[in-house]
Image: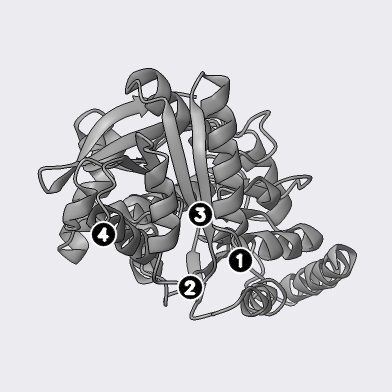
Amino acid sequence: MKEQRTRWCGVLAAWALLAGGCGEAADDPEELRIGVLVETAHLEGEPALKAARLAVERFEEQGGLLVDGRRHPVRLIERSDHRTPDEAVAAARELIYQEEVSVLVAGYLSRDAIPVAAVAESAGIPMVTPGSTMSETTAGKRYVFRVVYVDTFQAQVLARFVVLDLGLGTVAVLYNVADVYSRDITHAFCDEAEKLGGRCVAAETYTPGETDFQAQLERIGGQRPQVLFLPSFTDVVAIQARQARELGLQAVFIGADSWTAERLVGVTELEGAYVVHHWHPDLAATIPEAREFQDAYRGRYGEDPFAMTSVMWDALGLIFQAAAHGTDPETIRDALAATAGYRGATGSITFAGRHGDALRSAMILKIEDGRLKLERLVEP
């Protein structure tokens, strides 16, 4: 597919030269076409699109894309409302082969990001995923980059925080056995906790569609863990936390970036819970880029940004910086791969020498007194 696209690009280039010879406007700056693929049915889909649109607006207001002194127009081409990985792949192919985007932003969920990344790699189109944390997304690929950290890193951050900082040595997990993210992060967390001297006393599973977790929670409660790790999505976590407290389980709840933490603040049973994540409003106090993003998002939409909007904003910012070297896919890919110390809303991001996986910080947040508190900033 990559070769076929290259041949077509050669034909189009030749046609453009002929057009220029006939007096047409062949010297017009090339448009930077950015394909954005999100699942708007997901809680964070529509806000993510809003953040992408705002990033383009702000970028244009601040002077836009200049390459060798010439301003290039920037166009955001959106595809959304896919429900399955197959539909995400079909949408990605449309963006690449019909819309001829130069770069793709896709994959909040790893289930979509992994197959879409394979399409981008085959086509030779750089892809930036704002949300996928599974290692398979970037493994063995030249064209795929992630804004967020990988699951092994966030699992290690959580384990070290629980065992070394909180001094809680016995942990349990309730995870979705059918979900690779939930399963892999569970294993990484338990492995790291035990390396540090803790003990994983229970690892219970459930399957998609379950809403009654009492049997699993009773078995967990029988082991009296100090910590219960819930690596599931927001709606399931709320149910699990309520049922655990109803059964008298007093463990401290912890979570990973599958939690939309802002939407769990009102769940009484999660008071005192900790979660590792990518964004917190308090970053604005010390990071000018975080303050700029927060002010812009609030000013434009009248609401506070959250984790997935901030990483989308940074995905676009990374692309704008890379495209300043040239708007063709290969130049953008090379510039992304060389990125070192990019300052974004979520902190510093480096790809250089990382094969697409960002070197970046993580945040430990705490739900306390009805709000999210920035407990700790963890450097890699």
Tag 1, which secondary structure? helix
> Dot 4 lies on which element?
helix
- Is residue 321 shown left or right of residue 57? right
Task: Tell me the distance, in whole angstroms, between the alpha carbons under discs 2 and 4.
Answer: 28 Å
Q: Mark 1 to mark 2: distance in Å?
A: 9 Å
Pick the quarter of the image with the N terminus.
Answer: bottom right
Specify few, some or many for label 2: CA neighbours under 10 Å numbering under 14, 14-19, or 20 or more. Answer: many
Q: Nearer the viewer, residue 12 or 378?
A: 378
* Distance in Å between CA atoms under marks 3 and 1: 20 Å
Q: Which mark is residue 175?
A: 3
- Give x and y (percent) for residue 130: 50, 53
Q: Does label 1 or label 2 sit earlier along the sequence? A: 2
Using a 10 Å C-alpha cutoff, classify the residue at mark 4 as few (fewer than 14 neighbours), some (14 to 19) or many (20 or more): some
Q: Is residue 48 left or right of residue 151?
A: left
Instruction: Looking at the picture, tell me which residue is in the foreground, 357 or 211.
Output: 211
Give the x, y percent position of residue 183: 59, 51
- Which is nearer the N-term, disc 1 or disc 4? 1
User: Would you say the residues marked 1 and 4 are in contact, meaning their CB atoms lie under 8 Å apart?
Assistant: no
Q: Is residue 150 visible?
A: no
Mark sitting on residue 242? 4
Nearer to us of marks 3 and 2 is 3
Q: Element at badge 2? A: loop
Which label is found at residue 31?
none
Circles 2, 4 touching at the beta carbon (< 8 Å): no
Q: What residue is drawn where x is 45% and y is 41%?
A: 172
Q: Residue at x 26, y 34 (%)?
A: 288
**Which residue is labeled 2 in the image?**
39
Instruction: Specify the amino acid type for callout 3.
Output: Tyr
